[in-house]
Amino acid sequence: MRDIFASTLERLLGDLVTPALLRECETGTWPTALWSALEESGFAVAAAPEALGGAGAGWDDLYVVVRAAGKHALPLPLPEAVLANHLLARCGLEARNEALSIAARADIAMQGGLVSGRLLDVPWGRQAAGVLAIIEGVEPALVLLDPQQARVTAKQNVAGEPRDDLVFDGATPLASAPLPAGLSPECLWLGGAMLRSAQSAGALEAALAQSVQYATERVQFGKPIAAFQAIQHQLAVMAEQAGCAAVAAETAFVESMDGFSPFSIATAKVITAEAAGVVAGMSHAVHGAIGFTHEHALQHLTRRLWSWRSEFGNLGHWSQRLGQAVCAGGAAALWPAITSGHLELPPAEKAVA
Amino acid sequence: MDLPIRSFRHQPFPAETLALRAQVRSFLAEALKDRTPLRRSDSWMGVDAAFSRELGRRGWVGMTLPKRYGGQDAGPWARYVVIEELLAAGAPVAAHWFADRQSGPLILRYGSDAQRERYLPGICRGELYFCIGMSEPNSGSDLASIRSKAVRDGDDWVLNGQKVWTTNAHHAHVMIGLFRTGEKTDDRHGGMSQFLIDLQSPGITVRPITDLAGGRHFNEVYFDNVRLPADALIGTEGQGWDQVTAELAFERSGPERFLSSIALLHTLIDAVGRWPDTVQAREIGRLVARLSGLRQMSLAVTAELAAGQNPAWAASCVKDLGAVFEQDLPEIAQAIFDEAPATGGGSDHAQVLAALMQMAPSFSLRGGTREILRGIIARGLGLR
């Protein structure tokens, strides 16, 4: 399944996600034709079992989908929709082949079947067909909310991707269900971090590829700049970082097949966040002034890397929780944790300020 | 364009290695229970003949070699489990390390039947130690410029010259050495051959070189008209460079390239204690994430080896990134926990910090310098 997923989506995005489209989306335009093509492809519902309208795909297969979205700087919430449908299915709810989004930072409550409160930093919150959020408490529940019923404060991340705040006042959820045992109330935060790791892995690979190509084509002092050792070694470091990020992100997906793996996700988020800074910086250094223009395609990748590393917990958030867990277990527990991939993390500090 | 980084794919351990890991772990818990953190920090430079023999007795040395030569016919995953458990525990593995890692596989691949029968069983028993003779005084990174010579004399070979930085030559029984057997031609990688050299042979002098911390790991080895029989040549005359390149993939891909300082991470975690401050938690978490990521990369390399591919490119990535990690570790450790490094006494952490801080420069030298590795990586990206 994985190879078909990869080749299908890579081809589709390679054809449709053009630099012109990316620039247009940054002004707030919703690319209707692109979403229709994705809807037809069925990737958004792939994670749900067939009985609930999906394809029964596991996270190991879906890794390549999310990575491809990152590699092509897809200006749509496909990764979010994949996660949302996975979670809907985990709660026994029907999958929805729509532009679903997620709100990992939520302060909401339900009374008499009506939801009030606010959702923060919702990807494409103003345009999504539904936003998945968790109501915390003694009986945590999953709710799918309709942004049409919200007061929207529009804002964007560094890459111009919508990250909106939504306020609900007595909204009727599109769907809701109690969170089943075994699904942590942190599932949106963990899942979101996992998505951003894979998207970053894809963008890192693409930034490396663009930089390698540019270095072999750009001639200075009578030879391609790739001939200079200083350039070669920067590209080598970028390759190491991109390679480490890719395998760490994939490991997080594979280890989350039977439930989100906090250790693997924290590891992936830390590594991809660190790689994002290194690779974005070096790819711009290699590209020179041309890569600094709005016209050049590199910025669609680097500005996303700068955004995604901070979303769903930055390097400090995940490294701190990882470090706290490691220290709590003592040195003797470290190696068993690394080899098994299992380590419980302490709870995050309250995500909504 | 498909970049070679696509080789870094997640590799699950085969389920059958689970029992082996538990077995190795419980053996080490008992065998090393009195080993101090400082001695653990010397893991793959620590020599202990009895320990190597015990590993051999258990079938954990040369385990990928065929049974008829004393090995286990085990796959690379089983070997990986054993060596990473040994390194993580800080076991003294130096005596047999080079034989297990590269000399055994090299002899199996290029050796004659007689050579295999002569050397492999001793390797698998954990009794026969090897060292690697590559660098020379004027040939470090530029290995193809070596001048030590092997000249035919009747049926014999006569060796003259000098090797340097030869780790464990003072403990090893046999050196696999790279010597010039032909004149330099336009092909700067031609005219070199590898020899199996009994280090007891007349004309060989081994002199220790003391490292900056006073450690005695490496040596100079002098060859003064050393006479070897015809069958000391291994592989094909003139193909030494290709053989060495293949050998280096083994040398560069292993977990010792990021686990050799794990003793310091261990003492740091215990020194900091259960309640780290924010900076300590973040830095330790970051180190653990990097270590875990390096291990995933290394497993991907192992999968390529298992599939019979030459993972030289990916191995170079792991080794270079691993060296950066291992050099950052003492820097971060000394910055986030306020205890000065100490020698000859002091806490476990202070002593391990002192030892590894001083070893750190070697991490980007041994097995190929940072510059050489990044050059290999650049070539794989199509830049040169």
Image (cartoon, rainbow, N blue to C red):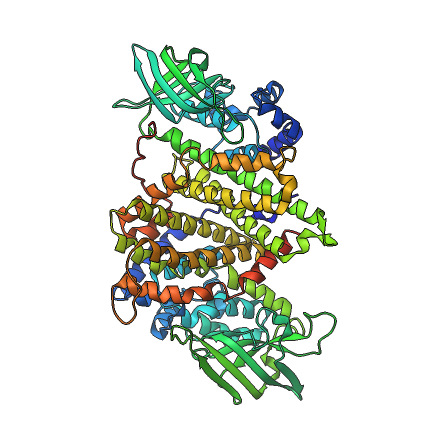
| Residue drawn 67% across the image and 52% down it | A226
Q: What x and y, as percent, mark residue A37?
A: 61, 22
The relative height of residue A203 versus residue B158 in the rendered view (above or below) is above
Q: x, y (%) of residue A119?
A: 39, 21
Report whether B333 appears left or right of B365.
Answer: left
Regarding residue A52, the answer to whether it shows in the image is yes
The quarter holding residue B211 reads bottom left
Looking at the image, residue B250 lies above or below residue B292: below
Q: How many marks?
A: 0
Report the quarter where the N terminus of chain B lies. top right
Q: In which quarter of the image is the C terminus of chain B?
A: bottom right
In the rendered image, the vertical position of residue B148 relative to residue B251, given as above or below: below
In the shown orientation, is residue A81 left or right of residue B330? right
> What residue sits 48% from the left and 27% below the top?
A80
Is B194 or A34 nearer to us in this picture? Answer: A34
Q: Residue furthest front?
A: A289
- Residue at 38%, 38% in the rendered image: A261
Q: Where is residue B99 in the image (x, y as percent from the top left)?
A: 48, 70
Q: In this view, does A7 lie to the left or right of B76?
A: right
The answer to whether one can see residue B23 in this image is no
Q: Where is residue B221 in the image (x, y as percent from the top left)?
A: 51, 81
